[in-house]
Image (spheres, rainbow, N blue to C red):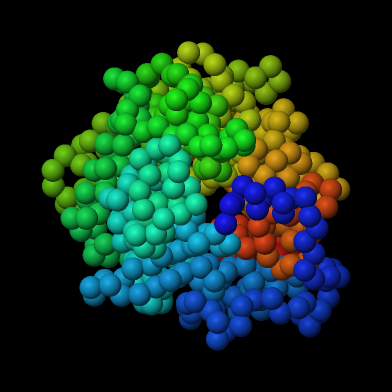
Amino acid sequence: MNRRLFLQNAALSSAVLFTKPSLGGSESSFPVVRVPESSRKFKSAAVEATIRAVKGKAGNSELAWLFENCFPNTLDTTVDFEMVNGKPDTYVITGDIDAMWLRDSTAQVWPYLPLMKQDEPLRQLIEGVIRRQTRCINYDPYANAFYKEQTRVGEWKDDVTDMKPGLHERKWEIDSLCYPIRLAYHYHKTTGDARPFDADWQQAMRLVIRTFREQQRKTGNGPYKFERRTTWATDGVPLGGYGYPVRPNGLICSMFRPSDDATIFPYLIPANFFALVSLRQLAELCQTLNIGGSLRTDALALATEVDTALKQYAVTTHPRFGKVYAYEVNGFGSFNLMDDANIPSLLSLPYLGAVKTTDPIYQNTRRMLLSTENPFFFRGKAGEGIGGPHAGMDMIWPLSIVIRGLTTTDPAEIRQCLTTLRQTHGGTGFMHESFHKDDATRFTRKWFAWANTIFGELVLKTFNERPALLG
């Protein structure tokens, strides 16, 4: 599938699949849209128990219905689990594209981590994701998306980069190497299980450090370049595939954002914050697991460099909001003030553990991002939220609304986010990649598991901490 063409066409068409139920209707008012039990890819007793618990106490029947559809969507539709040589292996597609993104696969299983202790098959499934990600990184640390079979040749085989069979896309994004560390770290924190962290995993982590070092570009552009024959500007990288120049300062270059769109200035600030968190988590994991060699010290040394550079280059002054975090910089003094819905974003920094929600600079930045000072903040008849170049202007991403809800302590703001999400599923019972600010039935990607699962994460967090908001 040509994802870009699919997005363009979907954004222009109406995609109403069901008549939107009336507010406050009984459970029978809502159509059954979840995959039939006999067709589900994976079944988790802990996930089903969680669904029953939320449905039993959520006062709003539409939110309960959406949670039942969305929270298990990754397990229902996207996972391919098997045992290979006695070890778990889990291939996770993103939804309507048969490829596994390192980013999406982590995010898709993330909300299930707290349930692993009470569900051994679920723990095995997530261990399989870690092992599959390890295999992907060792195959190519610069690639962002992979096929299950390394022999498969995909639609982007003619991209001007070191393209190999088994790669769906080879867009270099810092977060592609951060998400597997996030998953591994919290998997071990939750289970205490050390089995996935074998020699192959340690080799993958050394490749992560090496790749980050190469993309600090202290002695040249490094081995990675990317060009694509396309009329869509954000799908290619200028200046021979190396991007616009940077002044080396300790930050790591990212040629693409987590939206898979090309960066303008290669120092993507939220991605560097994510790298800082991930490197520290990697160092802690190495210490806990008694991993020898220099992996821990190398991770800490690189983290120190990134931290120092962020303190010097990540902040600028906005005439209205004061000190704020820039989205992208180049080390020469240029900066880009905006945000993109995809995570890591500036809005998501507390969610990733990069800053505290109370950080004054983050709060200034948040106010800027949720205003018209952010060129990709849209407000219309259907709702308000952040989008990005990927799906085009006036298209709001539910991801941004969910992250807004996950990074606030204001009950009114959480309620607003839940209400907007409930009112913008376009009658389908699922979240989408994006919807038009004035008409939620105009959306992109009716099967996008990351958006579904993270919506479930927000509902579950609200259920556990502020259940009255689900009324």
Q: Is residue 315 above or below residue 276?
A: above
Q: Nearer the viewer, residue 459 or 260?
A: 260
- Horizontally, is 152 left or right of 389 in the view? left
Q: Quadrant of the N terminus?
A: bottom right
Report x, y in % for residue 247: 41, 16
Report x, y in % for residue 96: 58, 62
Image point (70%, 73%), residue name: 65
User: Which image quarter: residue 183?
Assistant: bottom left
- Horizontally, is 330 left or right of 386 in the view? left
Report x, y in % for residue 308: 37, 24
Q: Is residue 211 above or below residue 292?
A: above
Q: Nearer the viewer, residue 163 or 357?
A: 163
On the question of residue 185 being in view, the answer is no
Image point (45%, 43%), residue name: 158
Image point (64%, 76%), residue name: 34
Q: Which residue sits furthest left? A: 293
Q: Quadrant of the C terminus?
A: bottom right
